[in-house]
Image (spheres, grey):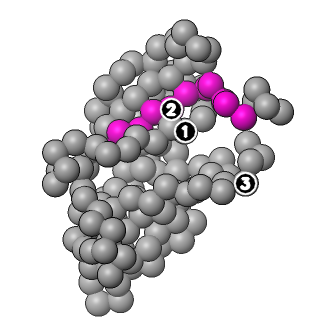
Amino acid sequence: MTVKPAIIPCLTYRDAPAAIAFLCDAFGFARHAVHADETNPSIVHHAQLVREGQMIMLSSDGGETEFQRKARMLHPAEAKGVTQTLYVVTDDVDAHAARATAAGAEILLAPTDQDYGGRNYSARDPEGYVWSFGDYDPFAETA
């Protein structure tokens, strides 16, 4: 994938170190940068994970920062659901779903061919965020 990300999703996790491990194991992300608290490594101030040139950022939940408080960021458990989902383009949807299943992801929608083209599946991570992975690339139509 050659598109340089211009929009980077940012998430908060109650157990950010465990979320980082899960996102890498289940969804194929890699650690780009992880800035944990020097006195308490269970608190992640900022992390960047990459997958095929695309990035997400995350931090520990709990309103530790002025921005989190002012933005009134809610964890899915506090919101009693999700307020956004993430879609990630992947080449082999079925293999990706198998990897996610093996790593313990809750599969919400098994790999399915879509009417608009492409194939995708959806999964919930351990803290409630919903991710969809598919081979439909909306940028391919404009290239």
- The residue sitting at the front extreme is 70
Residue 7 position, x and y percent, is 59, 55
* Residue 138 is one of the magenta-drawn residues: yes
- The residue sitting at the bottom extreme is 39
Relative vertical location of residue 36 with respect to residue 14 in this rendering, above or below: below
Residue stretch rendered in magenta on the structure? 129-139
* Residue 120 is one of the magenta-drawn residues: no
In the rendered structure, find residue 4 and report the number of the disc placed on it.
Answer: 3
In the rendered structure, find residue 51 and report the number of the disc placed on it.
Answer: none
Give the amino acid type for the residue marked by disc 2 in the picture: Phe
Q: CA distance from mark 1 to mark 2?
A: 5 Å
In the rendered structure, find residue 133 and report the number of the disc placed on it.
Answer: 2
Label 3 CA crowd tier, 10 Å (few <14, some 14–19, many 20+): few
- The residue sitting at the right extreme is 143
Q: Is residue 115 left or right of residue 79?
A: right
Q: Secondary structure at mark 3?
A: loop
